[in-house]
Amino acid sequence: MMMDRRTFSTALLAGAAASLISARGMAANPAPIKARNVVLVHGLFADGSCWSEVIPRLQAAGLNVTSVQNPLTTLPEAVASAQRVLDRQDGPTVLVGHSFSGMIVTEAGVHPNVSALVYVAARAPDAGEDYTALAKTYPTPPASAGIVFDGDEGRLSEQAFLHDFAGDLPEAKARVLYAVQQPFHKALLAGKTSHAAWRTKPSYYAVSTEDRTINPDLERFMAKRMGAKTIEVKASHLALISRPDEIAQLILEAAGQQA
């Protein structure tokens, strides 16, 4: 049967759209590549020790784990710190980011050693996207009001840290984390990603439903946009500490090593 020009054009567009959807789906949720390495990256108001509850669970599964010490200076310097660790990995590697370090995962995740990405209550911008502008389309989370600056260095006040950042942790434990909080430089917040690794790498996302640092609906939006395998965890922004079993299990899934 002959097609007229309009029918042909419609069919062509539909086919192109289906191809794009198919390609995106393949990038998001293929069978995971088996990885033996995991690289963890921390965000603002923290240091590499924030992964201390997740690390032993991954090591018990036989994974080689490295926690990057993010310098919290500028985005290029933070990305470079992760890239140096990725360079040292000996094969497929799951790259995991919490909070702000989702920016780093999104940029550094194009590294050839990276087999999958895991976002834990994390930023997940598109290439060149203004994350701050995106975040402003959702209600401002309470922790934002608790950021204080000493010149160019920012940190969370004790009240905001205990109540809005680590609200589901025992106070004594939250105070220990507050004591090792690392200040970030204002310049860090101005950075934009030039790549969106989640467009080509399998992606996983853990939404913190009780988050008072990043709006949970913003987390859901970013996870859906990237086509990520998504779990929801009833936790504060620090699900990696308050709910480490669920976070470790998601990482194991991304590594093709589910228990």
Image (tube, helix red, strand yellow):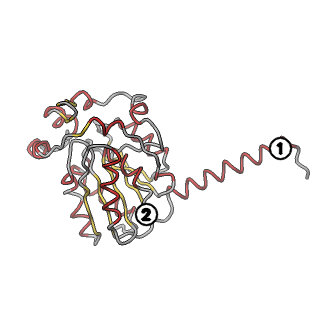
- Badge 1: how crowded within 10 Å, few (<14), some, or many (20+)? few
Question: Which residue does the image show at 25% across and 38% down from the upper left?
Answer: 185
Disc 2 + disc 1, Cβ < 8 Å: no
Distance CA(mark 2)–CA(mark 1): 41 Å
| Closer to the camera in the image, 148 or 167 | 148
Determine if residue 250 is in view: no
The residue under label 1 is 7
Question: Which residue does the image show at 21% across and 64% down from the upper left?
Answer: 56
Badge 2 marks a residue whose secondary structure is: strand
In the image, farthest residue toward the right: 2
| Closer to the camera in the image, 238 or 85 | 85
Badge 1 marks a residue whose secondary structure is: helix
Question: Which residue does the image show at 42% across and 44% down from the upper left?
Answer: 193
The number of callouts visible is: 2
Q: Judge from the rendering whether residue 199 lies leftward or rightward of residue 78; answer left or right.
A: right
- The amino acid type found where label 2 is placed reads Ser
Q: Where residue 47 sits: x, y (%)?
A: 20, 49
Dot label at residue 115: 2
Question: Which residue does the image show at 27% across and 65% down from the upper left?
Answer: 65
Q: Where residue 220 sits: x, y (%)?
A: 42, 41
Determine if residue 32 is in view: yes
Q: Judge from the rendering whether residue 221 lies leftward or rightward of residue 166; answer left or right.
A: right
Eye-nearest disc, 2 or 1: 2
Q: Quadrant of residue 118?
A: bottom left
- Say whether disc 2 or disc 1 marks the residue closer to the N-terminus: 1
